[in-house]
Each structure stands twice: as structure tokens, then as C-alpha cells.
Image (tube, rainbow, N blue to C red):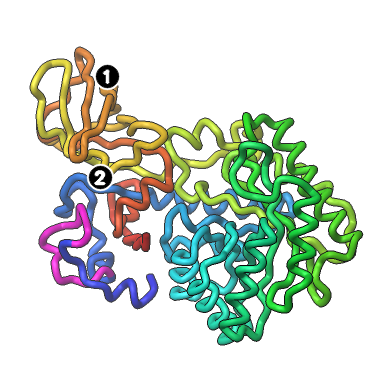
Amino acid sequence: MPAELANERVDHRFKGLPPDAEGLTVGELAAQRRNLFTGGFTTPVLALSAESVEHNLRLLEAYAEHHGLAFAPHGKTSMAPQLFDRQLEHGAWGITAAVPHQARVYRAHGIARIFLANELVDAPALHWLATELDADPRFRFICYVDSVRGVELMDAALTEAGATRPVDVVVELGAGEGARTGARTEADCAAVADAVAATTTLRLVGVAGYEGEVPQATTERVREWLNRLVALAADLDKAGRFSPGIDEIVISAGGSAWFDTVAEVFAGIPGLSLPVLKLLRSGAYVSHDDGHYRRLTPFNRAPDQGALQPAFRLWAQVVSRPTAEQAFTNAGKRDAAYDLDLPEAQVVRSARDGSQRPATGITVTGLSDQHGWLRTAPGAGVEVGDWLGMGLSHPCTSFDKWQLIPLVEADGTVVDYIRTFF
């Protein structure tokens, strides 16, 4: 654990932590190796499985290496520098960001390579970026451009800032009509490339996009769009539109649902005038989930290459049992992700003897701000005081509700605390 995080004091800001830990540093609390169930933690409390996180880190490292891909996992998923460090230790090229705040968090924690998957046109943020680049020659930064107007705004802000290092940019190809950002046609992309070439503050180093926004995505449609992206890189290269002096061409795509198709298409990238950095950006893998990504993960299509493990479990306490068919926990929308799937009841821990059993016959049917609604079938046997362990979906809206998350081994031992910065 980095010193600045280990030295932070435990207090009322952090949900679920033991009240008697008040005043300890996070490092001191971690060193006590308390048990999540008997060590004074209060409910609701979100836990990350130490074993599952490690498994997922190793699996994506091996997958990227096997397919010849560089890897810049999207940090917006966790906004947890401790996990960034683990991802970098497991072979990541850098960390992807979406907005300037995230990039600032990354830099504050020493991230040396950042891929910002957005067009950056905020003048104060560009001034900050120019300062960072000028101060640290080892810092590598790449971001999207998808419009001539965006290029104009970037150039004006960087010129005003007196930037001495140009900002590396990649043209974003939109995923189709009705998709999200990105230039819609190859002609639009060429116009953006020409606008970049007319500046001294920007360097065009490649192309990128996000296949997860392909309308009504199927493997065939995603493959077709990825082939367009690769062809765009080849066309820009042939036309000499990439900036002089660069030493590689960046081609980047890859969320958490189609990285197998990205790997397939990127394996067939034709020879270009420079080496190609094939950059994958999947982020949700680090924790995976028990809903959306469990259904969508490419490993479902390639089980011979492994399987991700859901790492989240939200523990809540049954606080009301008004009828035989209904119960309520003390975890609600403030604690659990609910934008894609409701929590999944998985395990009941008895308040009487600490025994655990599958949550058979228990279904989460809704969430209030601070309550979870449970439907209980005959024989469910859940009582007031029992702890209910739930799986969550999806990762990005699970991490952002918790500032300090216990990292827990299978026997309940808390071995670390993961700090988030949303």
C-alpha cells in the first residue's frame, strides 16, 4: 500500500469500517488482519475477493500477451490507484481515462502513460496537461480527436499555455450512425487528420474507437467496424497523414464485451510504415460482476482461454421481517449498483452461529435509498440479524459508492483496503 494511502486516518468518512478503528491509520488497520464477520465491521459493507482480483489480473495479462496486445485498462471502473499499480505489475502499458479529473488522479499517483478516450477541449485542463508534459519528459499522454473544431480548441489552448511538447492524438472513428462520439466517415477522419497536421501543438499518432457502441452489436457488425478502423489506419499511413517523427502507430479499441473480436481483427493488421501499438482498453475485468458482464464476457465464447471471477460481494443485514414472504436489508441505492441489474442474493450468514448457506429462495426485488427489498420463498428461513451476501452489477457503479473497500481472503481475513478517488 502506498505510504500516502497507508497513513490516511480511519474515521467517519468510510462506510462499514469498525467503529473501534477510529483514529488508526489505514495501514495500521490492515496490519491487524481483522475478520470481516467478527472484527467489528458494520453493515452494509462492500468487500472485494483478494483471490478473484488476483485471478482476473493474471488472466487478462496472459490473454493480452497471448494475442500480442498492449493493454491500457480503463481506470474509470475502479478509480483505485492500488489496483492501477497491480494492473501495471501485471503487464499493462498504461491506464485509460475518460475525463481530466481522472487523469489528474492518475498523475498524482505516478501513472506514466495515460490514454484519454475522449476529445479534450477544456482549456484549463489543457493548460494543466501542457504543464505536466513539459515537467516530465517520461510522461506519455494520448487522447482522441474527432472534429476540426476540437482540434482548433486544443491548438488554441495549448498555444496559450506555451506548451513545448506536442500532445499525441488519435482520430476517433465513430461506431456508426446513432452511436456515441467519433467522426462518422473516413472523409471526416481525413479532415480531422489534416487539421492536426496544420498545428504545431498536436501530433497524429494513430486511430481509435469503441466497438461497444456499434448499434445492435453482433460479432459480425463489431468485426465489420473494427475492419474499418484498421483500414482507416492503413489509409492514413499510406497518405502520409501520421505526424513525422513518431516511432509507432497506435490502433486502439476494446471494451469488456468484445475484446475477443478486437484480438481477432488486430491479429490481421497489415504491415504499415511503422510498428503498431495494438492497444486494448477493457476495464471491468478487474472485478468482473454477477450480472451484465457475466453474461457478456468474451470468455463465454472462448472458455478454453479461461474465465473471469466476480470479485464483489456486498454484505447487508436483515433488519426487518414483516411477513413470511418479505424481508428488508439495510443496503440500498446508496450502497449497491442498480443501473443494469439488481443485486443477486447469494449467501446467508446466520446471526445465531455464524454458519453460511446458499441464499436459496431469496430474491432482491427492489432498492430504496437505504433498504433492499427481499422476496422470501417458503423455507428461506432468513431472520432479522442475518447477514446477506450479494453479487453486484456493474463494476463502475459499484466502486463509486465506496471510498475504502476491504480486500478479503476466502476465510474472511481483510488483508488490505482499496481506496477510490471518484
Could you tell me which residue is drawn at 76 percent across and 48 percent down? 229
Indicate the secondary structure of the residue bearing disc 2: loop
Region rendered in magenta: 13-26
Give the mark nearer the N terminus: 1 vs 2: 2
Residue at 79 percent of width and 49 percent of height: 186
Question: Which residue position holds label 2?
Answer: 334
Number of numbered discs visible in the structure rendering: 2
Q: Residue at x 56, y 39 (%)?
A: 307
Q: Residue extending furthest top?
A: 378
Residue 147 lies, in percent from the top left, at 67, 57
Instruction: Measuring from the top left, give residue 2's x and y in whole percent.
Output: 39, 74
Residue type, mark 2 in image: Arg
Please identify the dominant SS of the magenta region.
loop
- Quarter of the image where the C terminus is located: bottom left
Front-lying residue, 1 or 271 = 271
Question: Is residue 91 shown above or below 157?
Answer: above
Which residue shows up at 54% across the image and 73% down it? 126
Residue 61 shows up from this direction = yes
Image disc number at residue 361 = 1
Q: Is residue 375 above or below residue 72?
A: above
